[in-house]
Amino acid sequence: MLNERQLTLLARLEHQPCSLNVLAQLTGVSGRTILRDIDYLNFTLSGKARVMAVASVGYQLEIFDRRSYFELLQRHDNDDRLLAMLLLNAFVTRTQLANTLNLPETWVAERLVRLKARYEKAFSIQSRPGAGHFIDEPEEKSLVLLANLLKKDPLLFPLPGIDPDSLARLQEACTHARDWPAIPADYLASIILAVYALRNRLSPDLAHFQNETLQRITDSVGLWLGADAFSAAVHFLDSHQQRAETITTQYIAGLLRSLPELTPLHVIDPQLIEDLTGHIVRCSASPVWLPENRQGSMNNLKAAWPAAFDLGIQFINKLREQQDIPVFDSDLVGLYFACALERHQQDRYPVILLADQNAIATINKQAIERDVMNCRVMIARTPAELRDLCADVEPALIVNNSHHFLDDAPGEVLIVKNIITPATIGQIKDLLASAFIRQRPERFFLSQGSFHYANARDEAWQSVMANICKRLTNDGHLTVDEAWRIEQREREGENLIVNQLAIPHCWSERQTHFRGYFITLAQSVSVNNEPVSHVLIACASASARQELKIFSYLASVLYRYPPTTISGLSGYEDFLALLRG
């Protein structure tokens, strides 16, 4: 059984690599103890994942089988069993929880506090003096919560008449149910088990519903629900099937068109509508308040595609204004928008191919333009032709496919011998993704507007943001509207924080290129329970899609270093040196 410290190590390493010292400080033990924990973790993970030492960054977690890895974690912590106890009983004391789980009462007390914080956005755990602890949610939501637990592990707690054989018969019977086509078979089975577990606690319903399909399923397993519980199950399944049927492609398309920041991007296409419709139908028909896997950090998506992430938040908020649908796997919504932005990328990167053999030049030009999206290849036969082309365009990349040496070439140069290989195509893609920022980072991250802010030790984040934006506005670096958008975005939550650097940002209607202002802080600030050592104010034009890749490049650079390096940056020049690598 993994202890709390070892689970904490895995949770931290799921998000980003960490040094041994940082892991030791996080858990309050010695580095030697951390090394022992890592050995035990690797033994326990048994090939599903592995904690590995990596030069310059410390330790990182490599997950080989994601589903099996999370299933293993669920068997090693007691959160699900504890939640099940709270759902199965009107009230339950700490002593009862400790006795049932066979765990120390002090552990239960500590875990209850953490569970309240972990799930505060999904549901509420409350306490009543003299009675005990309970989940303070409506009956239907409690039913969904228990069903979510049973979907992860149908044998999480003992139920009369339920064993592996009867469970297999139940799941088989559910695969043949046709009354609720929008509800997956495994979710249907978990709802039936949850109703069965809560059959004596469900409120009596004045109307008793009948359904031959559900009757046939329960009879095949030998489950007796009782009239009230049976009616509750039929009502739940029918209502969620009907609600799912209201989510159509026309409805989602209208919702997308109502988002003001989405229209100028021209990314609403059939694929985006289809992806979002399918996802919201699943959320509507089979709601999830407890994700099957631990919630991973969304920082990777936020950092690489903040425009897509922000659009995802706006879409979900607009949906919630109209429908009471719990949107699970919300990072997928952001990924759908990221894919749409990629599909509609219109900028064509200029690439100069220096080649002195006509046949090879033609073949390589065709290979690059075929395999690298949004790329325009120009051929130069001699260094003189190359210089002339560079005078007219600023190449994102120069591919030297000749015998000439280019020591003074203006920009990134990739040397390629003979015919371009798939591996070289991969190199070209990687270099193009960040070439335009790596060559001249000072074009986007400006020295004017970067400064030191002497915040007080107890100054709140919103106050820090207001004062920074006020100074940038007074100095003419931000408009009043841009400053308001940045402050508003920070109040919405899900702040973009990459390795202790906060990146408050907005999408500007001005047709100027990306502007970033690096601000050092005198005191570290806690934002959404994450430490923030410095601030990068970013203002981007959503119509200049090439510049959205700046965020992806930023993330790749910032995650390359330990948090101590980021927090130790003394000013603008240090930050620029970091970007140049």
Image (cartoon, rainbow, N blue to C red):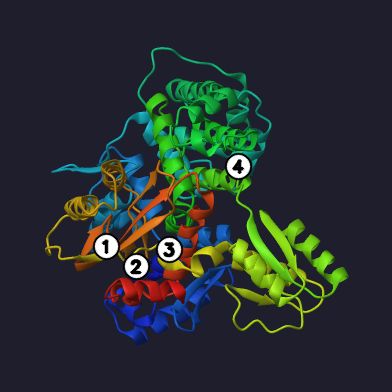
* The label number, if any, that marks residue 166 in the structure image: 4
Q: CA distance from mark 4 to mark 2?
A: 34 Å
Tell me the quarter of the picture where residue 18 sits: bottom left
Mark in the foreground, 3 or 1: 3
Residue 443 shows which numbered tag? 3
Whether pointer 2 and pointer 1 mark residues with C-beta atoms closer than 8 Å, the reply is: yes
Q: Residue at x 75, y 66 (%)?
A: 379
* Eye-nearest disc, 2 or 1: 2
Q: Residues within 10 Å of mark 4 (few under 14, many from 20)?
A: some
Instruction: Say if 215 sits above or below 567 in the image.
Output: above
| Dot placed on the residue nearer the N-terminal end, 3 or 1 | 1
Q: Looking at the picture, which amino acid does disc 3 mark? A: Arg
What residue would you read off at disc 1?
107
Q: Is residue 130 left or right of residue 334?
A: left
Real-space CA distance between mark 3 and mark 1, rounded to the nearest whole angstrom: 54 Å
Q: Earlier in the sequence, mark 4 or mark 3?
A: 4
The amino acid type, in three-letter code, at marker 2 is Glu
Q: Indicate which disc, 4 or 1, sits on the residue closer to the N terminus.
A: 1
In-image side of 552 versus 87 (left or right):
right
C-alpha distance separating marks 2 and 1: 10 Å
Q: What numbered label is drawn on residue 4?
A: 2
Q: Nearer the viewer, mark 4 or mark 3?
A: 3
Quadrant hosting residue 23: bottom left
**On the picture, is 160 further left or further right than 572?**
right
> Do labels 4 and 2 touch, CB within 8 Å?
no
**Other residues around mark 1 within 10 Å, as few (<14) / some (14–19) / many (≥20):** few
